[in-house]
Amino acid sequence: MNDEKEEATGRSVLTVTALNGIIKDILEGAFSGIWVEGEISNFKIYTSGHIYFTLKDADSQVRGVMWKGSRKYLRFTPKDGDKVVIRGRISVYNKRGEYQLVAEAMEPKGLGALQAAFEELKRKLAAEGLFDQERKKPLPAIAWSVGIVTSPKGAAVRDMIRTLNRRFPGLRIVLNPSPVQGDGAAAKIAKAIEELNEFGQVDVIIAGRGGGSLEDLWAFNEEVVARAIAASKIPIVSAVGHEVDFTIADFVADARASTPTAAAEIVAPEKAALQAQIAEHARKLRLEMRDKLEAESQFVDDLMVRLGASTRNIAQICQHKLEAMRGALRGQNPASKVRMRKERLGQLSLAMGRALTRLAEAKKVGVKTTIDRLAAIRPATWIATRKLELSRNKEALLKSMTLRIRNERNVIERSAAALAAYDPTKVLDRGYAIVTRAADGRVARTLADLAPGTRVRIQVGDGAAGATVDGKEKDAIKQGELF
Protein backbone atom coordinates (compact mmCIF):
# COMPACT_ATOMS: atom_id res chain seq x y z
CA MET A 1 0.00 0.00 0.00
CA ASN A 2 1.30 3.44 -0.86
CA ASP A 3 1.97 5.53 2.32
CA GLU A 4 1.15 8.71 0.41
CA LYS A 5 -2.43 9.38 -0.74
CA GLU A 6 -3.83 11.86 -3.25
CA GLU A 7 -7.16 13.35 -2.16
CA ALA A 8 -9.80 14.94 -4.40
CA THR A 9 -8.75 18.33 -3.14
CA GLY A 10 -5.27 17.77 -4.54
CA ARG A 11 -3.60 17.59 -1.14
CA SER A 12 -0.76 15.12 -0.55
CA VAL A 13 -1.43 13.28 2.73
CA LEU A 14 1.30 11.30 4.52
CA THR A 15 0.82 8.36 6.82
CA VAL A 16 2.53 8.39 10.21
CA THR A 17 4.94 5.72 9.04
CA ALA A 18 5.81 7.80 5.98
CA LEU A 19 6.33 10.87 8.14
CA ASN A 20 8.58 9.05 10.56
CA GLY A 21 10.50 7.57 7.64
CA ILE A 22 11.11 11.01 6.15
CA ILE A 23 12.19 12.38 9.52
CA LYS A 24 14.50 9.38 10.03
CA ASP A 25 16.16 9.95 6.64
CA ILE A 26 16.59 13.65 7.28
CA LEU A 27 17.86 13.38 10.86
CA GLU A 28 20.13 10.41 10.41
CA GLY A 29 21.57 11.87 7.25
CA ALA A 30 22.10 15.31 8.71
CA PHE A 31 23.34 14.36 12.19
CA SER A 32 26.15 11.86 11.82
CA GLY A 33 29.53 12.16 13.54
CA ILE A 34 28.36 15.04 15.71
CA TRP A 35 29.78 16.06 19.09
CA VAL A 36 27.37 16.81 21.92
CA GLU A 37 28.10 17.83 25.50
CA GLY A 38 25.84 17.58 28.52
CA GLU A 39 25.24 15.97 31.91
CA ILE A 40 24.48 12.28 32.28
CA SER A 41 21.42 11.11 34.23
CA ASN A 42 19.37 7.88 34.44
CA PHE A 43 22.54 5.94 33.65
CA LYS A 44 22.00 2.15 33.38
CA ILE A 45 24.04 -0.81 32.14
CA TYR A 46 21.87 -3.68 30.95
CA THR A 47 22.78 -7.36 31.02
CA SER A 48 23.15 -7.21 27.26
CA GLY A 49 26.13 -4.89 27.76
CA HIS A 50 24.39 -1.84 26.23
CA ILE A 51 24.33 1.50 28.08
CA TYR A 52 21.22 3.67 28.26
CA PHE A 53 21.19 7.20 29.65
CA THR A 54 19.79 10.70 29.33
CA LEU A 55 21.97 13.62 28.24
CA LYS A 56 20.71 16.97 29.48
CA ASP A 57 21.59 20.59 30.01
CA ALA A 58 19.81 23.39 31.84
CA ASP A 59 16.89 23.60 29.38
CA SER A 60 16.42 20.27 27.58
CA GLN A 61 17.38 16.65 27.33
CA VAL A 62 17.80 13.83 24.83
CA ARG A 63 17.77 10.08 25.28
CA GLY A 64 21.03 8.31 24.52
CA VAL A 65 22.42 4.82 24.05
CA MET A 66 25.87 3.28 23.63
CA TRP A 67 25.92 -0.19 22.14
CA LYS A 68 28.09 -2.92 23.59
CA GLY A 69 30.53 -2.78 20.69
CA SER A 70 31.36 0.88 21.37
CA ARG A 71 31.31 0.54 25.15
CA LYS A 72 34.39 -1.70 25.22
CA TYR A 73 36.49 1.29 24.11
CA LEU A 74 35.43 3.41 27.09
CA ARG A 75 38.42 4.34 29.25
CA PHE A 76 36.32 5.28 32.29
CA THR A 77 33.02 4.34 33.92
CA PRO A 78 30.40 7.09 33.52
CA LYS A 79 27.91 7.83 36.29
CA ASP A 80 24.99 10.14 36.97
CA GLY A 81 26.08 13.76 37.23
CA ASP A 82 29.17 13.40 34.99
CA LYS A 83 29.60 16.14 32.42
CA VAL A 84 30.72 14.48 29.21
CA VAL A 85 31.38 15.10 25.53
CA ILE A 86 29.90 12.49 23.19
CA ARG A 87 30.68 11.76 19.59
CA GLY A 88 27.82 10.00 17.86
CA ARG A 89 24.83 10.17 15.55
CA ILE A 90 21.07 10.58 15.66
CA SER A 91 18.88 7.51 15.27
CA VAL A 92 15.05 7.49 14.82
CA TYR A 93 12.83 4.66 16.06
CA ASN A 94 10.02 4.59 13.43
CA LYS A 95 7.39 2.76 15.44
CA ARG A 96 7.34 5.38 18.19
CA GLY A 97 8.47 8.38 16.27
CA GLU A 98 11.26 8.92 18.81
CA TYR A 99 14.85 9.78 18.21
CA GLN A 100 17.90 9.19 20.35
CA LEU A 101 21.60 9.96 20.40
CA VAL A 102 23.71 6.89 19.63
CA ALA A 103 27.08 7.44 21.36
CA GLU A 104 30.10 6.04 19.57
CA ALA A 105 32.71 7.62 21.89
CA MET A 106 32.50 9.39 25.23
CA GLU A 107 34.95 11.32 27.36
CA PRO A 108 34.65 13.55 30.42
CA LYS A 109 34.23 17.21 29.62
CA GLY A 110 37.46 19.09 30.19
CA LEU A 111 39.50 15.86 30.59
CA GLY A 112 40.39 13.29 27.95
CA ALA A 113 38.97 9.80 28.36
CA LEU A 114 42.43 8.26 28.57
CA GLN A 115 43.51 10.72 31.21
CA ALA A 116 40.34 10.06 33.18
CA ALA A 117 40.94 6.31 32.99
CA PHE A 118 44.55 6.88 34.08
CA GLU A 119 43.49 8.85 37.15
CA GLU A 120 40.77 6.35 38.02
CA LEU A 121 43.12 3.33 37.89
CA LYS A 122 45.81 5.25 39.72
CA ARG A 123 43.45 5.96 42.63
CA LYS A 124 42.29 2.33 42.72
CA LEU A 125 45.77 0.78 42.78
CA ALA A 126 47.09 3.35 45.27
CA ALA A 127 44.24 2.46 47.62
CA GLU A 128 45.26 -1.21 47.36
CA GLY A 129 48.85 -0.35 48.34
CA LEU A 130 50.50 -1.30 45.02
CA PHE A 131 52.45 1.97 45.02
CA ASP A 132 53.75 1.62 48.61
CA GLN A 133 57.51 1.83 48.93
CA GLU A 134 57.55 -0.93 51.55
CA ARG A 135 56.50 -3.60 49.05
CA LYS A 136 59.12 -2.70 46.43
CA LYS A 137 62.14 -4.98 45.99
CA PRO A 138 65.73 -3.68 45.96
CA LEU A 139 67.72 -3.95 42.74
CA PRO A 140 70.78 -6.25 42.77
CA ALA A 141 74.16 -4.55 43.21
CA ILE A 142 75.42 -6.32 40.07
CA ALA A 143 72.95 -7.92 37.67
CA TRP A 144 74.76 -10.71 35.82
CA SER A 145 71.65 -11.50 33.77
CA VAL A 146 69.06 -8.91 32.59
CA GLY A 147 65.62 -9.68 31.16
CA ILE A 148 63.99 -7.22 28.74
CA VAL A 149 60.29 -6.98 27.88
CA THR A 150 59.74 -4.70 24.88
CA SER A 151 59.17 -4.70 21.15
CA PRO A 152 62.02 -6.39 19.25
CA LYS A 153 61.65 -3.89 16.39
CA GLY A 154 61.83 -0.51 18.13
CA ALA A 155 64.83 1.70 18.73
CA ALA A 156 64.41 1.25 22.48
CA VAL A 157 65.57 -2.37 22.51
CA ARG A 158 68.65 -1.52 20.42
CA ASP A 159 69.52 1.35 22.78
CA MET A 160 69.18 -0.87 25.85
CA ILE A 161 71.26 -3.73 24.41
CA ARG A 162 73.96 -1.34 23.19
CA THR A 163 74.12 0.42 26.57
CA LEU A 164 74.25 -2.85 28.53
CA ASN A 165 77.06 -4.25 26.37
CA ARG A 166 78.99 -1.00 26.54
CA ARG A 167 78.76 -0.61 30.30
CA PHE A 168 79.24 -4.27 31.27
CA PRO A 169 80.65 -6.43 28.45
CA GLY A 170 79.75 -10.08 28.86
CA LEU A 171 76.50 -9.35 30.68
CA ARG A 172 73.82 -11.92 29.80
CA ILE A 173 70.76 -10.39 28.10
CA VAL A 174 67.45 -12.30 27.80
CA LEU A 175 64.92 -10.64 25.49
CA ASN A 176 61.29 -11.76 25.81
CA PRO A 177 59.67 -9.78 22.96
CA SER A 178 56.17 -8.37 23.19
CA PRO A 179 54.14 -5.75 21.32
CA VAL A 180 53.98 -2.53 23.31
CA GLN A 181 51.15 -0.79 21.45
CA GLY A 182 47.71 -1.62 20.13
CA ASP A 183 44.93 -4.04 21.02
CA GLY A 184 46.06 -6.91 23.23
CA ALA A 185 49.50 -5.41 23.87
CA ALA A 186 48.91 -5.05 27.63
CA ALA A 187 47.99 -8.73 28.06
CA LYS A 188 51.10 -9.79 26.10
CA ILE A 189 53.37 -7.55 28.17
CA ALA A 190 51.95 -9.09 31.36
CA LYS A 191 52.45 -12.57 29.91
CA ALA A 192 56.08 -11.82 29.01
CA ILE A 193 56.78 -10.67 32.59
CA GLU A 194 55.21 -13.87 33.96
CA GLU A 195 57.30 -16.00 31.58
CA LEU A 196 60.56 -14.39 32.74
CA ASN A 197 59.56 -15.13 36.34
CA GLU A 198 58.91 -18.74 35.41
CA PHE A 199 62.26 -18.85 33.59
CA GLY A 200 63.88 -17.63 36.80
CA GLN A 201 67.38 -17.10 35.39
CA VAL A 202 67.51 -13.30 35.28
CA ASP A 203 68.44 -10.98 38.15
CA VAL A 204 66.36 -7.98 37.04
CA ILE A 205 63.76 -7.14 34.38
CA ILE A 206 63.45 -3.98 32.28
CA ALA A 207 59.93 -3.40 30.91
CA GLY A 208 59.40 -0.43 28.64
CA ARG A 209 59.36 1.21 25.23
CA GLY A 210 60.31 4.43 23.49
CA GLY A 211 58.35 7.69 23.57
CA GLY A 212 54.97 8.43 22.02
CA SER A 213 51.56 9.90 22.68
CA LEU A 214 49.38 8.95 25.62
CA GLU A 215 47.53 6.56 23.32
CA ASP A 216 50.82 4.98 22.22
CA LEU A 217 51.97 4.44 25.79
CA TRP A 218 48.58 3.25 26.99
CA ALA A 219 49.46 -0.46 27.25
CA PHE A 220 51.63 0.41 30.29
CA ASN A 221 48.61 2.09 31.90
CA GLU A 222 46.51 -1.07 31.80
CA GLU A 223 45.61 -2.80 35.07
CA VAL A 224 46.77 -6.21 33.83
CA VAL A 225 50.34 -4.90 33.37
CA ALA A 226 50.31 -3.18 36.78
CA ARG A 227 49.27 -6.38 38.53
CA ALA A 228 51.86 -8.46 36.65
CA ILE A 229 54.60 -6.07 37.79
CA ALA A 230 53.33 -6.16 41.37
CA ALA A 231 53.24 -9.98 41.35
CA SER A 232 56.77 -10.36 39.94
CA LYS A 233 59.30 -12.02 42.26
CA ILE A 234 62.13 -10.49 40.20
CA PRO A 235 62.80 -6.73 40.59
CA ILE A 236 61.41 -4.71 37.66
CA VAL A 237 62.59 -1.38 36.28
CA SER A 238 60.00 0.50 34.22
CA ALA A 239 61.35 2.45 31.26
CA VAL A 240 58.42 3.95 29.32
CA GLY A 241 58.67 6.94 27.02
CA HIS A 242 60.64 10.06 27.86
CA GLU A 243 61.50 11.73 31.14
CA VAL A 244 58.20 13.66 31.28
CA ASP A 245 56.06 10.58 30.63
CA PHE A 246 54.58 8.80 33.65
CA THR A 247 52.58 5.59 33.44
CA ILE A 248 50.88 3.32 35.97
CA ALA A 249 53.75 0.87 35.44
CA ASP A 250 56.18 3.52 36.74
CA PHE A 251 54.30 3.77 40.05
CA VAL A 252 54.11 -0.01 40.57
CA ALA A 253 57.62 -0.95 39.43
CA ASP A 254 60.45 -1.39 41.91
CA ALA A 255 62.38 1.41 40.17
CA ARG A 256 61.56 3.91 37.41
CA ALA A 257 63.92 5.03 34.69
CA SER A 258 63.24 8.16 32.67
CA THR A 259 64.12 6.37 29.38
CA PRO A 260 65.02 2.84 28.25
CA THR A 261 68.67 3.88 27.99
CA ALA A 262 68.58 5.20 31.56
CA ALA A 263 67.13 1.86 32.66
CA ALA A 264 70.09 0.04 31.15
CA GLU A 265 72.46 2.39 32.98
CA ILE A 266 70.65 1.72 36.28
CA VAL A 267 70.90 -2.07 36.12
CA ALA A 268 74.41 -2.30 34.60
CA PRO A 269 77.25 -0.41 36.28
CA GLU A 270 80.23 0.49 34.11
CA LYS A 271 82.52 -2.53 34.22
CA ALA A 272 85.70 -0.47 33.79
CA ALA A 273 84.71 1.88 36.61
CA LEU A 274 83.78 -1.11 38.73
CA GLN A 275 87.14 -2.77 38.02
CA ALA A 276 88.94 0.48 38.85
CA GLN A 277 86.97 0.69 42.06
CA ILE A 278 87.90 -2.90 42.92
CA ALA A 279 91.56 -2.20 42.11
CA GLU A 280 91.51 0.88 44.36
CA HIS A 281 89.96 -1.12 47.17
CA ALA A 282 92.59 -3.84 46.65
CA ARG A 283 95.38 -1.22 46.78
CA LYS A 284 94.02 0.26 49.99
CA LEU A 285 93.65 -3.21 51.43
CA ARG A 286 97.26 -4.08 50.58
CA LEU A 287 98.47 -0.84 52.22
CA GLU A 288 96.41 -1.51 55.31
CA MET A 289 97.72 -5.10 55.47
CA ARG A 290 101.32 -3.90 55.07
CA ASP A 291 100.89 -1.30 57.83
CA LYS A 292 99.23 -3.91 60.01
CA LEU A 293 102.03 -6.44 59.42
CA GLU A 294 104.72 -3.85 60.16
CA ALA A 295 102.97 -2.84 63.37
CA GLU A 296 102.58 -6.45 64.42
CA SER A 297 106.19 -7.21 63.54
CA GLN A 298 107.36 -4.30 65.68
CA PHE A 299 105.17 -5.51 68.51
CA VAL A 300 106.68 -9.00 68.24
CA ASP A 301 110.23 -7.58 68.30
CA ASP A 302 109.46 -5.53 71.40
CA LEU A 303 107.90 -8.55 73.01
CA MET A 304 110.95 -10.69 72.26
CA VAL A 305 113.24 -8.06 73.79
CA ARG A 306 111.11 -7.84 76.92
CA LEU A 307 110.87 -11.63 77.02
CA GLY A 308 114.66 -12.01 76.78
CA ALA A 309 115.19 -9.64 79.72
CA SER A 310 112.54 -11.40 81.75
CA THR A 311 114.13 -14.79 81.01
CA ARG A 312 117.49 -13.62 82.32
CA ASN A 313 115.89 -12.21 85.46
CA ILE A 314 113.99 -15.45 86.05
CA ALA A 315 117.20 -17.50 85.63
CA GLN A 316 119.01 -15.35 88.20
CA ILE A 317 116.16 -15.63 90.69
CA CYS A 318 116.02 -19.40 90.23
CA GLN A 319 119.79 -19.63 90.82
CA HIS A 320 119.52 -17.67 94.05
CA LYS A 321 116.67 -19.85 95.23
CA LEU A 322 118.61 -23.00 94.42
CA GLU A 323 121.67 -21.84 96.40
CA ALA A 324 119.48 -20.96 99.35
CA MET A 325 117.87 -24.39 99.30
CA ARG A 326 121.23 -26.11 99.11
CA GLY A 327 122.45 -24.18 102.15
CA ALA A 328 119.33 -25.07 104.07
CA LEU A 329 119.74 -28.74 103.23
CA ARG A 330 123.40 -28.71 104.25
CA GLY A 331 122.39 -27.25 107.64
CA GLN A 332 119.98 -30.10 108.35
CA ASN A 333 121.03 -33.71 109.44
CA PRO A 334 118.34 -36.32 108.55
CA ALA A 335 119.44 -38.69 111.40
CA SER A 336 119.11 -35.88 113.90
CA LYS A 337 115.60 -35.07 112.67
CA VAL A 338 114.57 -38.76 113.03
CA ARG A 339 115.91 -38.85 116.58
CA MET A 340 114.02 -35.68 117.45
CA ARG A 341 110.81 -37.12 116.04
CA LYS A 342 111.28 -40.33 118.15
CA GLU A 343 111.82 -38.29 121.30
CA ARG A 344 108.72 -36.24 120.56
CA LEU A 345 106.74 -39.44 120.00
CA GLY A 346 107.84 -40.84 123.38
CA GLN A 347 106.84 -37.63 125.14
CA LEU A 348 103.43 -37.74 123.53
CA SER A 349 102.94 -41.41 124.57
CA LEU A 350 103.72 -40.62 128.26
CA ALA A 351 101.37 -37.61 128.19
CA MET A 352 98.60 -39.74 126.70
CA GLY A 353 99.04 -42.44 129.41
CA ARG A 354 98.81 -39.86 132.20
CA ALA A 355 95.69 -38.38 130.59
CA LEU A 356 94.03 -41.79 130.40
CA THR A 357 94.80 -42.49 134.08
CA ARG A 358 93.27 -39.16 135.13
CA LEU A 359 90.20 -39.86 133.03
CA ALA A 360 89.71 -43.35 134.56
CA GLU A 361 89.99 -41.92 138.10
CA ALA A 362 87.43 -39.26 137.28
CA LYS A 363 85.01 -41.85 135.95
CA LYS A 364 85.39 -43.97 139.11
CA VAL A 365 84.52 -40.98 141.26
CA GLY A 366 81.43 -40.34 139.11
CA VAL A 367 80.23 -43.92 139.41
CA LYS A 368 80.68 -43.91 143.21
CA THR A 369 78.72 -40.67 143.47
CA THR A 370 75.87 -42.14 141.47
CA ILE A 371 75.81 -45.29 143.66
CA ASP A 372 75.69 -43.15 146.80
CA ARG A 373 72.75 -41.17 145.45
CA LEU A 374 70.83 -44.31 144.61
CA ALA A 375 71.48 -45.72 148.09
CA ALA A 376 70.18 -42.50 149.66
CA ILE A 377 67.02 -42.64 147.62
CA ARG A 378 66.16 -46.30 148.66
CA PRO A 379 63.78 -47.34 145.83
CA ALA A 380 61.95 -49.96 147.95
CA THR A 381 60.96 -47.33 150.51
CA TRP A 382 59.88 -44.92 147.79
CA ILE A 383 57.70 -47.63 146.17
CA ALA A 384 56.06 -48.55 149.52
CA THR A 385 55.25 -44.89 150.16
CA ARG A 386 53.70 -44.50 146.74
CA LYS A 387 51.56 -47.67 147.29
CA LEU A 388 50.24 -46.28 150.58
CA GLU A 389 49.34 -42.99 148.91
CA LEU A 390 47.55 -44.90 146.15
CA SER A 391 45.50 -46.91 148.69
CA ARG A 392 44.48 -43.75 150.52
CA ASN A 393 43.45 -42.05 147.32
CA LYS A 394 41.39 -45.12 146.32
CA GLU A 395 39.44 -45.08 149.65
CA ALA A 396 38.79 -41.37 149.36
CA LEU A 397 37.56 -41.82 145.81
CA LEU A 398 35.15 -44.63 146.86
CA LYS A 399 33.73 -42.51 149.70
CA SER A 400 33.25 -39.59 147.35
CA MET A 401 31.50 -41.74 144.77
CA THR A 402 29.21 -43.35 147.40
CA LEU A 403 28.20 -39.95 148.73
CA ARG A 404 27.56 -38.66 145.23
CA ILE A 405 25.36 -41.70 144.37
CA ARG A 406 23.35 -41.28 147.63
CA ASN A 407 22.72 -37.62 146.87
CA GLU A 408 21.63 -38.34 143.34
CA ARG A 409 19.27 -41.13 144.59
CA ASN A 410 17.63 -38.71 147.04
CA VAL A 411 17.08 -36.21 144.23
CA ILE A 412 15.48 -38.89 142.06
CA GLU A 413 13.20 -40.09 144.93
CA ARG A 414 12.01 -36.53 145.61
CA SER A 415 11.31 -36.00 141.92
CA ALA A 416 9.35 -39.28 141.75
CA ALA A 417 7.25 -38.29 144.77
CA ALA A 418 6.51 -34.95 143.16
CA LEU A 419 5.48 -36.65 139.95
CA ALA A 420 3.25 -39.13 141.90
CA ALA A 421 1.48 -36.22 143.54
CA TYR A 422 0.40 -35.06 140.12
CA ASP A 423 -0.80 -38.53 138.98
CA PRO A 424 -4.56 -38.19 138.13
CA THR A 425 -5.23 -41.81 139.08
CA LYS A 426 -4.23 -41.18 142.67
CA VAL A 427 -7.36 -39.07 143.29
CA LEU A 428 -9.48 -42.11 142.40
CA ASP A 429 -8.38 -43.72 145.70
CA ARG A 430 -10.01 -40.80 147.48
CA GLY A 431 -13.46 -41.45 145.96
CA TYR A 432 -13.26 -39.55 142.73
CA ALA A 433 -14.10 -41.00 139.29
CA ILE A 434 -13.14 -40.26 135.70
CA VAL A 435 -15.98 -40.32 133.15
CA THR A 436 -15.15 -40.83 129.48
CA ARG A 437 -17.45 -41.21 126.50
CA ALA A 438 -17.46 -44.76 125.19
CA ALA A 439 -17.74 -43.64 121.57
CA ASP A 440 -14.50 -41.63 121.37
CA GLY A 441 -12.81 -42.07 124.76
CA ARG A 442 -13.04 -38.32 125.37
CA VAL A 443 -13.07 -37.23 129.05
CA ALA A 444 -16.38 -35.59 129.96
CA ARG A 445 -15.50 -32.23 131.42
CA THR A 446 -18.87 -30.47 131.19
CA LEU A 447 -22.55 -31.38 130.87
CA ALA A 448 -22.28 -30.52 127.20
CA ASP A 449 -20.19 -33.69 126.75
CA LEU A 450 -22.96 -35.92 128.29
CA ALA A 451 -26.16 -35.87 126.26
CA PRO A 452 -28.94 -38.24 127.47
CA GLY A 453 -28.46 -41.76 126.07
CA THR A 454 -24.66 -41.35 125.81
CA ARG A 455 -22.72 -44.47 126.74
CA VAL A 456 -19.97 -43.65 129.20
CA ARG A 457 -17.16 -45.39 131.04
CA ILE A 458 -16.70 -44.63 134.73
CA GLN A 459 -13.20 -45.27 136.13
CA VAL A 460 -12.83 -45.54 139.93
CA GLY A 461 -9.93 -46.53 142.20
CA ASP A 462 -10.18 -50.25 141.71
CA GLY A 463 -11.64 -50.52 138.17
CA ALA A 464 -14.19 -49.17 135.71
CA ALA A 465 -17.89 -49.64 134.84
CA GLY A 466 -20.10 -48.80 131.87
CA ALA A 467 -23.27 -46.70 132.10
CA THR A 468 -25.81 -44.76 130.07
CA VAL A 469 -26.67 -41.13 130.78
CA ASP A 470 -30.41 -40.91 131.66
CA GLY A 471 -30.52 -37.21 132.30
CA LYS A 472 -28.48 -34.25 133.47
CA GLU A 473 -28.99 -31.40 135.84
CA LYS A 474 -26.81 -28.34 136.16
CA ASP A 475 -25.37 -27.42 139.58
CA ALA A 476 -26.75 -30.60 141.15
CA ILE A 477 -23.63 -31.10 143.24
CA LYS A 478 -23.75 -27.62 144.57
CA GLN A 479 -27.33 -28.14 145.67
CA GLY A 480 -26.48 -31.50 147.27
CA GLU A 481 -28.73 -33.46 144.96
CA LEU A 482 -27.74 -36.95 143.91
CA PHE A 483 -28.82 -39.26 141.16
Image (spheres, rainbow, N blue to C red):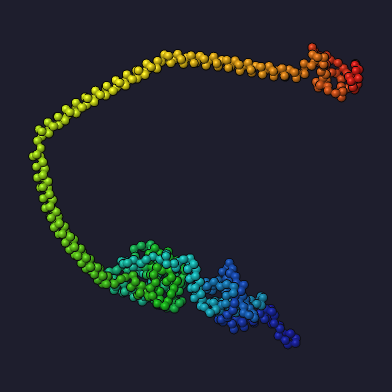
Measuring from the top left, give residue 87's x and y in whole percent. Answer: 55, 79
Measuring from the top left, give residue 93's x and y in whole percent. Answer: 63, 76
Q: What is the count of numbered marks?
A: 0
Name the residue nearer the viewer: 206 or 399.
Answer: 399
Measuring from the top left, give residue 119's x and y in whole percent. Answer: 49, 73
- Left of 204 or right of it: where is 343? left
- Left of 468 or right of it: where is 235? left
**Up/down of 377 relative to 252, above or below:** above
Res 92 seen here: no
Res 54 seen here: yes
Residue drawn at (58%, 80%), measured in percent from left and top?
Answer: 37
**Up/down of 34 relative to 373, above or below:** below
Name the residue nearer the viewer: 270 or 103.
Answer: 270
* Residue at the outermost left position: 330
Q: Quadrant of residue 207?
A: bottom left
Measuring from the top left, give residue 60's x and y in whole percent. Answer: 64, 80
Q: Quadrant of residue 161?
A: bottom left
Q: Quadrant of the N terminus?
A: bottom right
Q: Quadrant of the C terminus?
A: top right
Q: Quadrant of residue 253?
A: bottom left
**Up/down of 276 relative to 477, above or below:** below
Residue drawn at (9%, 45%), measured in percent from left and top?
Answer: 323
* Residue at the outermost bottom position: 10
- Left of 397 or right of it: where is 319? left
**Up/down of 263 relative to 313, above or below:** below
* Residue at the outermost top position: 462
- Left of 407 or right of it: where is 139? left
Name the residue nearer the viewer: 357 or 74.
Answer: 357
Residue drawn at (77%, 16%), measured in percent from left and top?
Answer: 426
Residue drawn at (61%, 82%), measured in percent from left and top?
Answer: 27
